[in-house]
Image (cartoon, helix red, strand yellow):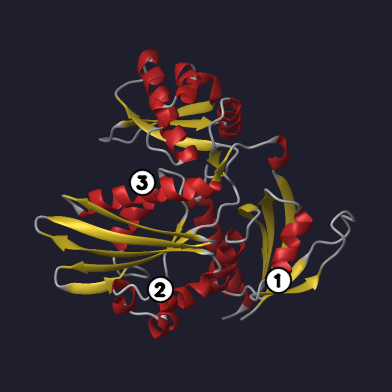
Amino acid sequence: MSHHRKLSALVALFLLFALSTAGAADSALTIRIPVESQQPEVREQAVTRAMAQLLIRLTGRDDASQAEAAAPLLEQPGRFLQRYQYESQPGQQLILSMLFDAGAIRRALAERGMPTWRADRPPVLVWLALEQGGRRLLVGGEDGAEVRAQLQEAAARRGVLLLFPLMDSEDQQRISHADVFGGFTDRVRLATERYGTPLMVMGRMYRDGGGWVARWTLSGNAMQSAWITSGASGAEALDAAAAELAVRLATRYAVIPSAADALQQLKIRVVGVGSLRDYDRLERRLRAVNGIAEVRTLGLEPDTVTLQLTLQAAPSRVLALLSQDRQLIPLILPEIDSGQQVPEFRLVP
């Protein structure tokens, strides 16, 4: 592939990534609500509904809007609204898009003793063995796309970050449906290592009578728990699974933030990023590093990408973690306070 084609491919990936993560930063969040009209009273009701959704996303609790600490926010949700706009398409329902100051909401909840998600929480890699219509498959790659989308959406509503395996040739050599369905944790953990996240959840989902049953096991970072969900439909069983996963993760990764948690920025350069797959692998690795809250692309050159990392840990600590990563080779590691050079790494092929 020529340098021009590589760069064009990376630009395309960057645009897709930017669109998919718009409004996902911890500092601001966008909520879109269908409305019947642009009347002020209809808008006020939509703002309250949006705040209820935000409370769930920031805390991981389905009952967040019923908590005593949430009452003042629901009484005056408009004070956290930064801007709004109406979106309309011919033949479609009117949508009210609202941008909220998530940082201010977090601080308001902290003042009332209500924990919210840590920005440096790692994603959870999902290994889901599915039996559907006589087929047995592992959800990932192009298999089980509908199930993956349902679980991803249910988790995102609760602020839970999920990854799914690529199920490429490397995964297929290491893992099978039988390994996950049979609960062979050691084999699954070995297959998880390439994804750079300490957390994995194994699921076995199948029809039972007229409904669906799914059995789940969460492990990693000294966490180990299991639960069962069920539902009349697969979507119901998956939604219940995401709700329970959020509850269990919140015991470790939801905290009452303090002034010490203020976000910082760190710019880095990474060479050896010559394809879409390289970029995707790099982005996954960085998001799995404790202390990195957000990854944003600043510039693209042939085989090189410049990134801005939003941190919730000291830059020196994050650089130390990056230097220890098996997939990144340090090339330039200046003193973090010098400001003269940008830290540079090489992505291992």
Identity of the residue drawn at 42% across and 72% down: 166
Q: CA distance from mark 2 to mark 1?
A: 26 Å
Counting from the top left corner in percent of width and height, residue 322 is at 70, 66
Q: CA distance from mark 3 to mark 1?
A: 34 Å
Q: Is residue 333 left or right of residue 277?
A: right
Residue position for label 3: 243
Q: Nearer the viewer, mark 3 or mark 2?
A: 2
Q: Quadrant of the C terminus?
A: bottom right
Q: Are marks 3 and 2 in contact (CB under 8 Å)?
A: no
Counting from the top left corner in percent of width and height, residue 244 is at 36, 48
Task: Indicate the secondary structure of the residue bearing disc 2.
Answer: helix
Identity of the residue drawn at 82% across and 67% down: 333
Q: Residues within 10 Å of mark 3 (few under 14, many from 20)?
A: some
Residue position for label 1: 324
Residue position for label 2: 185
Looking at the picture, which amino acid does disc 1 mark?
Gln
